[in-house]
Image: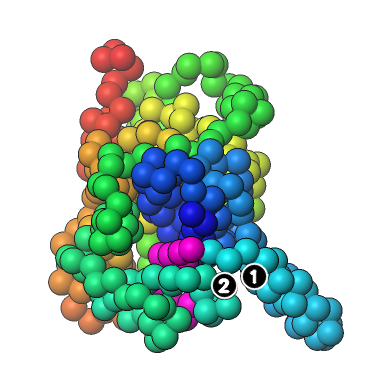
Amino acid sequence: MKVLIVKLSSLGDVIHTLPALTTLRRARPDAHLAWLVEPAATEILLGHPALDRVLVLPRTEWRVMLRTGRLLTATRRLGAFLRELRDTFYDLVLDFQGLAKSAVWVAAARAARKVGPGPGRRRNELAWGAYTERVPLPDPGAHAVERHLALLEKLGLPRLPVRYDLPVPAEHEREAGALLAGLGLAPGAAFVAAVPQTRWPTKNWTAAGFAAVADALAQRGLPVVFTGAPADRAALDEIAAALRTPMRRLDGRTSLKTLAAVFRHARVVLATDTGPMHLAVAVGTPVVALFGPTDPGYTGPHGAGHVVLRRGVPCSPCFKRTCHTRVVERHACMTRISVEEVVRAVLQQGGTLAER
């Protein structure tokens, strides 16, 4: 049996789909499993023990070519990708994205069955037209992980315990250890990893808040290591300016798998609603998540052992990148989360140094 999984992006969405992948592998150990993904999340899939093949959609590459006027080159690259996509006839294509951008490639793939979600919480942008089968899923408010597993159940696969089986090779463990040592943390030392920045301004907590939490935890002997992408440098600089204690930071210094290794060593990961939060869940580290404009029931940290902090303002969740509320003060869903409750949640999740 040959199966193609289509889940292009984003990082968190791809991680949400890993339990479906591991379920497929355990239920069909002899199957050939392939995955179509965009470049940004490719690293998470490479080397995964349940996967036989990773197909990378060169979307960013095409954009650059078109922007620079290389239309012929872009056309040739598209042709090469389509040949790669269509070089295998699949028994089953599973579209876990359920959007127009994924359905285009589902339609282009060669397969006997093309399956995707039916009506649900989000509009699926006419993706249905690409499917031979539409699977209506129960409970549209269920977590994304549960919805993906429910789709497999509808196809007759057994419900198995959630597993991510995210591979973190030894070289990334060594790199993480070296980076933490460079921050003055001995092997096995307790620390909190913080992920303060997202791509949505409305999902971000305050720089002053993160600084105050880091100072409070440092006073209790629990240092905070700030993480982020190179683009987050300015945001972390703002936090650094508000800190009273020296800042430990790794922004722009880790690959995704090295970041996974850092999270694996952390006592707790403190994060807003962002992909790396789900990376922490996948490696088994307790999470304290700060939520405002989005719904933790749908995209929060999945499973037991995590804490979500949010304020029940009437306009939340709004699912908007810009705050337009007239009901409460702007950004109230995030700014009303207090430093004290974040510190308390982190200590409860990670325990005190004396307790461990």
Q: What is the magenta range? A: 91-103
Residue 291 in view here: no
In x, y percent, where is residue 84?
70, 66
- Describe the element under mark 2 as helix, strand or loop: strand
Q: Upstream in the sequence, badge 2 or badge 1?
A: 1
In x, y percent, where is residue 174?
64, 24
Verify whether residue 131 appears in magenta.
no
In x, y percent, where is residue 252?
64, 47
The label number, if any, that marks residue 209 in the structure image: none
To which residue does mark 2 refer? 110
In x, y percent, where is residue 7?
48, 63
336 or 129: nearer the viewer = 129
Q: Is 124 left, or right, of 168 in this rendering? A: left
- Describe the element under mark 1 as helix, strand or loop: loop
Asked if the residue under mark 1 is in contact with the one under mark 2, i.e. CB atoms within 8 Å, the reply is yes
Q: Is 333 left, or right, of 219 in this rendering? A: left
Q: What amino acid is at disc 2?
A: Arg
Residue beneath the point at 51% across and 74% down = 106
Q: Quadrant of the C terminus?
A: top left
Q: What amino acid is at disc 1?
A: Arg
Give above or below for 108 relative to 269.
below
Give above or below for 246 relative to 272.
above
Q: Residues within 10 Å of mark 1 (few under 14, many from 20)?
A: some
To which residue does mark 1 refer? 86
Residue beneath the point at 30% across and 67% down = 293
Which quadrant would residue 69 be assigned to in this image?
A: bottom right
